[in-house]
Amino acid sequence: MAPAASNPVWDIFCKVVDNFGDAGVCWRIAALLHQEHSLAVRLWIDRPQILKALRPDLDADASRQQLDGVEVIDWSRIKPDPASANVVIEAFGCGFPDDYVTAMAGLPLPPLWIVLDYLSAESWVDTHHGLASPHPSLALPRWYFYPGFAAATGGLPRERDLLSRRDAFDAQARAGFFHESGMTAPDAAVLTVSLFAYADAPVTDLLSALAEDSSPTLLLVPAGAVVPAVQAFFGTTADQARRGNLEVRLLPFLPQSRYDQLLWACDLNFVRGEDSFVRAQWAGKPLVWQPYRQDDGVHQRKLEAFIQRYTAEFEPATVVAVAAFTAAWSAGTPVRDLWPALRAARGEWARNALGWSRKLADLGEMSAKLVEFVRNKVK
Ligand code: TRH
């Protein structure tokens, strides 16, 4: 097993399947491990151009480069050598080439191999986190690391100062955020909503509900899959439109740090996948999650498991409103009639969302848990 080196090198391997989540999560963990745990971290990513959307200062053509102290390496162009790593993280079961695994097995002290899995609130995660999964044919130990929502899991990634930065994001900072986006900050009477979702979400239905609502809504939509549906609803490709009580603003795809500010600046955030979902929870604001669709329907079970944990302390009426709306949103079925109850639940939901973020913070943070996990294995 890997030695306890004085300056251990951690390699994180990321294959981009689609979208931004693979790159988004891997980058976040890489940055945390370096910045908060002073580790030498290399992020091997097969499509650095996806990471560039989140970090516009990245050079997508460079085969290797430093970004915030992390070495980002184009895995499609450079072959990794396991001999130079103490810990290897195989993110989301991305798989290693056979020769890499054989080379690992041939080392006198192979690196510690961790398979980082996707996030799920399902209860089995609490008992499977940290289990060994030795390689089927080679003498290579391998460990499963599950992020999650309980103390027994690997937790969720969070920068040490995230919640204090969020709490310091006051009315003035919010006004600055809108100003930088070419807008005036909406006043408190306007429900401000961000929308990040997959193309099969019932977007037109949501927009109808917001337009018909007796109270005003400002909807902020970063570039992405739902923009065509928004443009079709308003009948324009302009980046600003109004219908009934709904005003929409199309935004560019924001750098990751600015996306956090968007979540903080809104009263309600529609998020998807994994990383935006986690960031919306840290934002401490009401959220509607659309999980990444899986053929076997696992996403529905993940959604139910999350809603069960998330709403455990909500008032019964809020539980019903949040659960019903979220289930329909995720399934792509009509949400128009479910909207009024969701909007009415807003006050109590907002208080609980803030409490939820604090509760999660008390469960332990993922990069710290990774470091502790490795420390326990190399003892
Ligand atoms: O892009 P996603 O749908 O990613 C998904 C999920 O991770 C899913 O589990 C995985 O299987 C699949 O990819 C392959 O959603 P996610 O996870 O929220 O990632 C989006 C990232 O983009 C996240 O880091 C936030 C960031 N983002 C910005 O930086 N700026 C933006 O304007 C927006 C809308 C998002």
Image: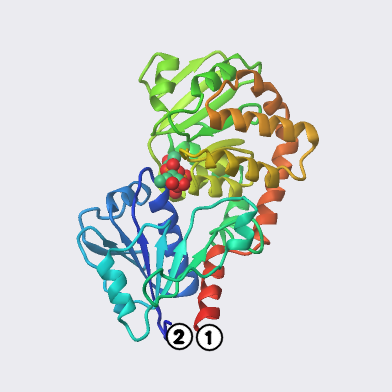
Q: Label 1, secondary structure: give it.
A: loop
Residue 232 visible in the picture:
yes
Q: Residue furthest front?
A: 137
Residue 153 visible in the picture:
no
Question: Pointer 1 and pointer 2: residues touching (CB < 8 Å)?
Answer: yes
Where is residue 296 shown, x and y percent of the image?
49, 39
Is residue 24 found left or right of 121 in the rendered image? left
Q: Label 2, secondary structure: give it.
A: loop
Query: Quadrant where the N terminus lies?
Result: bottom left
Q: Which residue is mark 2?
A: 4
Q: In the image, what residue occupies the spot 59% across and 42% down?
A: 301
Instruction: Name the kind of residue labelled 2 in the image.
Output: Ala
Tell me which numbered mark, 1 or 2, is placed earlier along the sequence: 2
Can you say whether 216 is above or below 18 in the image?
above
Can you say whether 110 is above or below 207 in the image?
below
Ligand 1 shows up in which quadrant of the image? top left
Q: Which residue is mark 1?
A: 379
Residue placed most toward the observer, 212 or 205: 205
Instruction: Name the kind of residue labelled 1 in the image.
Output: Lys
Where is residue 194 shown, x and y percent of the image?
52, 34
Where is residue 27 shown, x and y percent of the image?
40, 58
Q: In the image, what residue occupies the spot 67% across and 34% down?
A: 323
Colour convention: rainbow
Is residue 270 found left or right of 323 in the rendered image? left
Where is residue 150 shown, x and y percent of the image?
66, 58
